[in-house]
Amino acid sequence: MAHRTNGSNGVDTATRFDNVDPEKGAQEPLLGRIEKIESILSSPAYQPYRPHSTRVANAGPLGLFAFGYTTALLSCNYTKWTGSEGTTEFSYAFALMFGGLVQLLAGMWGIWRNNTFAGTAFSSYGAFWLGYGIYGILVSGKVLTGAEAEGEQAFLALWAIFTFCLFLQTFNINVALLLLFWFLTLAFALLSAGPNHPRVVKAGGYFGIAAAFMAFYTALAELTEEVYRRTILPVFILNVTTAQIPNQDARPDTL
């Protein structure tokens, strides 16, 4: 008879069945034999496999804080609140690490959690800040000469279009994100006006600060809800459509 060993204590459980004396077993009360069998079957060797939990924490607050911080830092330059060259170069490092790498990681975690919107938004803006930081460092080091004004305007205009596409999705998420992406769309659109329209660019900087504020607010609301297990700062959930995609949760994606 094949023997099975209990991995936890090295006891050969199959042998325990084989070595039972038939005469002694016949004299033993039925209830006692049942209890003995139950004790053997309850050993770890006979327990079903239970995989470890793969639940991933919500990376939304982390990504939103990273986005809000770097957006505010850059927008302050456009509003001339901190317009020195040193401040601009200082922002490149944080654009690479906090705004770029951290947001990219938050996007990957969002995809792992099956959150398509968070994965798309965080990964895309993470790539934006990584590109901004690398480009700024190369220009400051005289490795690159820098883009023409028309090229920068086209770059920002394309990001305005992309942000507007994300803005359209927020009508089924919450008001806080709706305002965030609306302010960000206006910021990119106004910043694309170029150096020939300094007042328009400055207004774009103010909308960038407004978007950063909403990012901080939404991040704080989500973080507080995770920690305290209740809603303290409302984000005003929206649910325009009630149609449910097969094999998807009924609750819409959120950051």
Image (cartoon, rainbow, N blue to C red):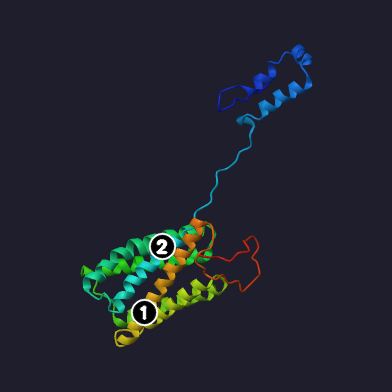
Dot 1 amino acid type: Tyr
Q: Which mark is residue 103?
A: 2
Dividing the picture into quarters, in which one does residue 147 lie?
bottom left
Position above or below: 154 against 93: below
Q: Nearer the viewer, residue 250 or 15?
A: 250
Residue at 38 percent across and 78 percent down: it is 156
Q: Position of residue 84 (x, y in %)?
A: 22, 74
Residue 194: x %, y % from top left: 32, 84
At mark 1, the secondary structure is helix
The structure residue drawn at horizontal position 29% and vertical position 63%, both measured from the top left corner, is 93
- Residue 24's quadrant in the figure? top right
Of the pair 84 and 225, the residue shown nearer to us: 225
Within the image, what quadrant is residue 37 found in? top right
Residue that numbered label 1 is attached to: 206
Disc 2 marks a residue whose amino acid type is Gln
- Mark toward the start of the polypeptide (2 vs 1): 2
Q: Please indicate whether residue 99 sits to the left or right of residue 248 in the image.
A: left
Q: Which element type, helix, strand or loop, lies under badge 2?
A: helix
Task: Please say if 112 is above or below 34.
Answer: below
